[in-house]
Image (cartoon, rainbow, N blue to C red):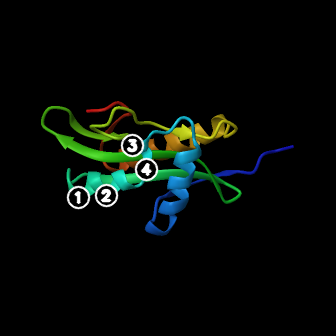
Amino acid sequence: MDRLPIVVNLLKAEDALRWDEFVRRCPQATFFHLSAWRELMEEVFDHRTFYLYAERAGDIVGVLPLAEVRSRLFGHALVSLPFCVYGGIAAAEDAGPETLYALESKAETLARRSACSTSNSAT
């Protein structure tokens, strides 16, 4: 039986509760993945953010929080959770490799559009 397709979306305010519920259930996620860090990145560090989530049949199956960082030291990059201990994709155990691929592909597209390099390590 074929699995339903993965759809990747940008987090909107009305989806923050669903995002946070997924993060709290996901063993790969840390509190750094919670949606509140988005506001912190934007307001305190003045980074533009792209919080991506993958859905299958209306259920969130993976998240990838990203921030666009401009630094004299590190350059212009799209980074997962800069200044945090852990970043990157957090996905449900049964999400499948197609979820990781979909989130990574969307991140690469965003990076190209912004003329950024990509990284999922802290800066």
Residue to which mark 2 is pinned: 39
Residue to which mark 1 is pinned: 43
Q: Which disc number belongs to residue 32? A: 3
Q: Secondary structure at mark 1?
A: helix
Q: Amino acid at mark 4?
A: Leu
Classed neighbour count for the residue bearing mark 2: other residues with Cα under 10 Å, few (<14), some (14–19), many (≥20): some
Q: Residue furthest left?
A: 72
- Residue 98 position, x and y percent, is 65, 39
- Tag 1–tag 2 contact (CB < 8 Å): yes
Q: Amino acid at mark 2?
A: Glu
Classed neighbour count for the residue bearing mark 4: other residues with Cα under 10 Å, few (<14), some (14–19), many (≥20): some
Q: Secondary structure at mark 3?
A: helix
**4 or 2: tag closer to the N-terminus:** 4
- Tell which of 85 and 54 is nearer to you: 85
- Residue 12 position, x and y percent, is 45, 65
Q: Amino acid at mark 3?
A: Phe
Compared to residue 39, the image places residue 27 above or below, namely above
Residue to which mark 4 is pinned: 34
Give the CA separation, mark 4 to mark 2: 10 Å
